[in-house]
Image (cartoon, grey):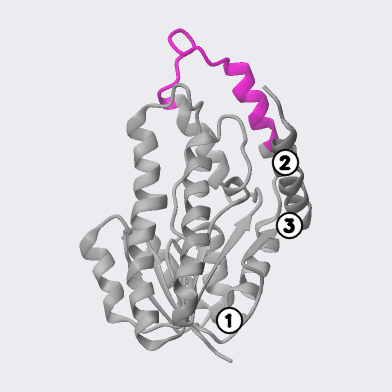
């Protein structure tokens, strides 16, 4: 059955791919982008494909932009908008750390609260948080982003229990490392403030960690999983993909129980 799906952060990456793919499947998409340039480009692609989509600019950190959500009725809300930035937690400038939390946690929850009120009032609906494998694991020099996604995991688990009695479903989708450019740009950002002469973190250690970015997965694989899960009536609370990432995350969590310092 066709669903009306509201998704934030659809201007690029997995969010954009999922929005286009879901629209192709016959769902009605309300897709928002961070800025007008992304809106223009997404509108262009939607028109070229003959897709009927509502597309507008909504910076989730902007109160006036968020207020636009009140004008729409939808069945599913996908909290996808996020930013990414890496760096060693012992030295990352706190303004950068706070900026990630402002978008990935605080503004995200503000949009979710708007959706939650709508769903509670009608007794149905589904909220999906786009989390990450980083939400249940820990990788050196990815700490700022990892911290925000750990917060999202706690929020999602709590909301799932709080909203269930109102007929509202809550779930997370946790992608592994996909080659959209999102992770690569994150790795680059820390070098805007990092200085070998004044910071104690070893640059070679960070660069060695970044070598893993050469082995990222094909985004189309994750987009396909999102297109499957987002409109489904029932599925697992957490969908981590691909399977090998899920197994690695489970193993890492188990190791923490036995780890000594």
Q: Earlier in the sequence, mark 1 or mark 2?
A: 1
The local crowd at label 2, few if under 14, some if 14 to 19, many if 20 or more residues have their Cα within 10 Å, is some
Asked if residue 151 lies in the magenta stretch, the reply is no
Q: Which mark is residue 67?
A: none
Dot 3 falls on a residue whose secondary structure is loop
**Residue 237 seen in the current view:** yes
Q: Earlier in the sequence, mark 3 or mark 1?
A: 1
What whole-number distance in Å separates the C-alpha atoms at marks 3 and 1? Answer: 23 Å
- Looking at the rendering, the stretch of residues picked out in magenta corresponds to 192-212
Q: Which residue is mark 1?
A: 24
* Position of residue 220 in the picture relative to residue 16 (left or right): right
Q: Are marks 3 and 1 in contact (CB under 8 Å)?
A: no
Relative to 20, does residue 242 appear above or below in the rendering? above
Q: Residue furthest bottom?
A: 1
**Residue 126 seen in the current view:** no
> Which of the two marks, 2 or 3, is nearer to us in this view?
2
Viewport quadrant of the C terminus: top right
Q: Which mark is residue 242?
A: 3
Residue 49, position as x, y percentages in the image: 53, 79
Relative to 233, does residue 17 appear above or below in the rendering? above
> Which of the two marks, 1 or 2, is nearer to us in this view?
2
- Res. 228 image quadrant: bottom right
């Amino acid at each position: 059955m066709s669903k009306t799906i509201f998704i934030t952060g659809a201007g690029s990456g997995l969010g954009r791919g999922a929005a286009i793919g879901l629209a192709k499947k016959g769902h009605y998409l309300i897709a928002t982008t961070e800025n007008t340039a992304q809106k223009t480009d997404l509108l262009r692609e939607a028109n070229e494909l003959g897709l009927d989509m509502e597309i507008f600019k909504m910076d989730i950190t902007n109160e006036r932009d968020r207020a636009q959500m009140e004008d729409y009725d939808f069945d599913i809300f996908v909290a996808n908008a996020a930013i990414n930035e890496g760096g060693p937690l012992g030295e990352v400038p706190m303004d950068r750390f706070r900026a990630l939390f402002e978008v990935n946690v605080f503004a995200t929850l503000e949009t979710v609260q708007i959706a939650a009120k709508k769903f509670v009032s009608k007794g149905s609906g589904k909220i999906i948080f786009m989390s990450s494998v980083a939400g249940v694991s820990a990788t050196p020099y990815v700490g700022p982003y990892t911290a925000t996604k750990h917060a999202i995991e706690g929020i999602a688990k709590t909301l799932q229990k709080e909203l269930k009695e109102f007929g509202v479903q809550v779930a997370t989708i946790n992608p592994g490392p996909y080659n959209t450019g999102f992770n690569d740009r994150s790795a680059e950002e820390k070098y805007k403030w990092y200085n070998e002469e004044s910071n104690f973190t070893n640059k070679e250690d960070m660069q060695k960690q970044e070598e893993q970015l050469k082995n990222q997965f094909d985004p189309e694989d994750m987009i396909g999983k999102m297109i499957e899960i987002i409109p489904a009536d029932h599925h697992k609370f957490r969908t981590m993909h691909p399977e090998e990432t899920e197994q690695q995350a489970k193993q890492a969590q188990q190791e923490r129980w036995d780890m000594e310092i």
